[in-house]
């Protein structure tokens, strides 16, 4: 990060490092907490979210999932929270980038500039711009997608096999761009 006249400028390299750290360390930690109950068995929350296979969760389970995510976020250091904010902004940008299609190059430059300013503002004022809510929503979608990757009815009870499969999916999701 570069500071000029008390303004913080984020370089592309620093952004990549923070996003990668969030993926490799924090998202992996979240997925492990979500998937395992004290490291040995699948958690009840994981099983319940898995049961709905990516569909809209009933209110009670959505509330439990939201509380789980809030608790995870509340226990993060400011530095780790900042890394997840960068991860969230990166995810928002990737979604935005997928949605932009039929625009001319000039229009695209203007749109990218405006969206870039919006993302920067979210970073500098996370509470006022709902970045915290965006983070929670991204984490919720990640956990729902993660849980829906498993067919628990067909998985053998062999713990080591389940752990290996889940770690492979965690690795894949953490490194998905």
Image: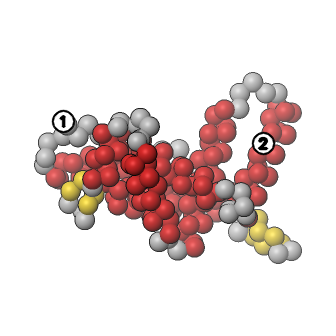
Count of marks, rendered view: 2
Would you identify the image quadrant in which residue 96 lies?
A: top right
Badge 2 crowding class, 10 Å Cα cut-off, few under 14, some 14 to 19, many 20 or more, is some
Residue 15, picture quadrant: bottom right
Across and down, in percent, residue 12 comes to 68, 57
Mark 2 lies on a secondary structure that is helix
Q: Is residue 83 above or below residue 171?
A: below
Circle number at residue 112 = 2
Residue 90 lies, in percent from the top left, at: 62, 50
Q: Name the residue at 14% across, 42% down.
A: 156
Secondary element type, mark 1: loop
Say which quarter of the image contains residue 30: bottom left
Marks 2 and 1: CB-CB under 8 Å? no
Q: As displayed, is residue 158 above or below residue 76?
A: above
What's the mark number on residue 10?
none
Assess disc 1: are there few (<14), some (14-19) or many (≥20) residues with their C-alpha within 10 Å of its C-alpha: few
Q: Residue furthest top?
A: 102
Q: Is residue 63 found left or right of 132 in the rendered image? A: left
Q: Which residue is mark 1?
A: 154
Considering only order in the chain, which callout, 1 or 2, is on the residue closer to the N terminus? Answer: 2
On screen, 34 above or below 142? below
Position in image of residue 97 (x %, y %): 67, 38
Q: CA distance from mark 2 to mark 1?
A: 45 Å
- For image coordinates 81% across by 46% down, the residue present is 114
Question: Visible in this render: residue 114?
Answer: yes
Residue under the image location 50 percent in, 69 percent down = 74
Residue 175 visible, this orientation: no
- Residue located at (73% from left, 64% from top): 124
């Amino acid at each position: 990060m570069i500071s000029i006249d008390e303004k913080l400028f984020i370089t592309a390299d620093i952004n990549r490092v923070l996003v990668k750290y969030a993926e490799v360390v924090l998202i992996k930690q979240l997925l492990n907490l979500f998937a395992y109950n004290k490291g040995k068995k699948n958690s009840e929350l994981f099983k319940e979210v898995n049961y709905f296979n990516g569909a809209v969760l009933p209110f009670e389970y959505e509330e439990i999932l939201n509380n789980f995510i809030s608790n995870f976020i509340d226990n993060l250091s400011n530095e780790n929270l900042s890394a997840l904010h960068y991860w969230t902004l990166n995810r928002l940008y990737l979604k935005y980038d997928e949605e932009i299609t039929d625009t001319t190059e000039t229009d695209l430059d203007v749109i990218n500039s405006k969206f870039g300013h919006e993302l920067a503002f979210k970073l500098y004022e996370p509470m006022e711009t709902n970045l915290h809510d965006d983070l929670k929503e991204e984490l919720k979608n990640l956990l729902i997608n993660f849980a829906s990757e498993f067919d628990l009815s067909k998985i053998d009870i062999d713990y080591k096999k389940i752990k290996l499969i889940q770690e492979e999916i965690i690795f894949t999701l953490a490194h998905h761009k």
